[in-house]
Image (cartoon, rainbow, N blue to C red):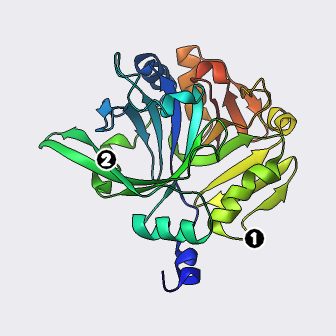
Amino acid sequence: MSDPVAAIAKIRPVLDHVVINVMGRLDEAAAQYARLGFQLTERGHHTLGSSNNLAIFGNDYLELLGYLPGRETQRADLWAHPPGLTGLVFKSVDADLAYCTLQARGVPVQPPMSFARPVTLAEGTHDARFKVIRVSGGQVENGRTFFCHHDTPELVWRPEWQQHRNGVTGIAEFVIAARNPARTASLYEQMFGEGLLSQISGGVSFRAGAATVLVLQPDAVAARYAGAPLQSADGSDRMVALVFRVASLDTPRSVFDAAGIAYQSYAGGIIVSHAEAANVALGFTA
C-alpha cells in the first residue's frame, strides 16, 4: 500500500451489526426476541452453513446466529464461543483496503472471505452477498471482532423490516466486561489509531458511529446496568449487554408489560435481564 497513513484514516469505527450466538436454539431465541418486540426477518441460511434471523434498524442490526439440526459441525469455530453476545462487527467500505490497512497496523487479520444467503422478496429470491475481514481467532476472548462489507445493502436495510413494536431505531451501546479494560480495548486502538479510547468510570469507551462501545470492569458493569448482564464465571472477558435507542421508554414498557417480561430501571432507562434475552442484557434508552 503506497500511503498507509491515508488508508488508515479511511478505516473508522462504525458499528455495522452485533451477533448473538444462540447455537441450536434459533427457534427459541427468535420467539423470545419477537416477544421482546423486535420484528425479525425470515430465517436465512448462509452458504457457509450457519443460519440466522435479523432485527434491522436504521443503520445497524442485530443478528441471532445459530445452526439447524445436523449442521453443528459446520462453522464449528463459531460454536466454540459461549451462548450470548459474541460478535462486534464494524462497517467496511472496501474489504481489500480494510485488510491491507489492518495488516499495516500489525493487527492479526484474515484475508477477506466472501459468502451469501438467499433473501426472498415479493418479486423473487436474491442473494445477499457479503465480504468479512476477521481479526484472527484468540485475539478476542469468548467472541469475535470483524469488518463486514455489504455488496448488496439493499437486501438488508429494507424499510419494511425496520419497524419494531418496541420502538427500537438503533444500537446505542455495546458492552464488554473485562478485568483489564485497557488491555482488552488496546486491540481496537491498534485497529483504529491512537486517541480512540476515552477514560470513563470503571473502564474505557470509544465511539463507533452512532453507538458507543464500553469496556468495563465486571463490578462496573454490574453497577451501571443494575446487575442484569451475565458475566464469565472464570473471569475471562465477555460481551455482555446491548443498549437500544428508542423515542420513548413507554413503547418498550408497554410491550414488556403485555408479554409478562420483567424489566427494571437503571440510570440510562430500563433493562431486561440476560435470562430473558438469550444471555444478553438488553437496555433501552430514550
In the displayed orientation, state which residue is furthest to the left.
123
Q: Is residue 222 left or right of residue 94?
A: right
Mark 1 sits on what residue?
Answer: 195
Measured as percent of width and height from the top left, residue 285 is found at 66, 42
Measured as percent of width and height from the top left, residue 280 is found at 62, 29
Residue closest to the eye, 173 or 100:
100
Residue closest to the eye, 165 or 95:
95
What's the residue at 15%, 40% (across, down)? Answer: 122
Mark 2 sits on what residue?
Answer: 115
**Which numbered disc flags the more N-terminal residue, 2 or 1?**
2
Figure disc tally: 2
In the displayed orientation, state which residue is furthest to the bottom.
2
What's the residue at 47%, 50% (across, down)? Answer: 60
Measured as percent of width and height from the top left, residue 62 is found at 48, 40
Q: Quadrant of the C terminus?
A: top right
- The residue carrying pointer 1 sits among few (fewer than 14), some (14 to 19) or many (20 or more) residues within 10 Å by Cα, namely few
Residue type of the residue flagged with mark 1: Gly
Q: Is residue 139 above or below residue 143?
A: below
What's the residue at 46%, 37% (across, down)? Answer: 63
Q: Is residue 229 left or right of residue 152?
A: right
| Residue 24 at least partly seen | yes
Residue closest to the eye, 23 or 285:
23
In the displayed orientation, state which residue is furthest to the top.
260
What's the residue at 66%, 36% (across, down)? Answer: 241
The residues tagged by marks 2 and 1 sit, at their Cα atoms, a distance apart of 34 Å
Secondary structure beneath label 1: loop
Residue type of the residue flagged with mark 2: Phe
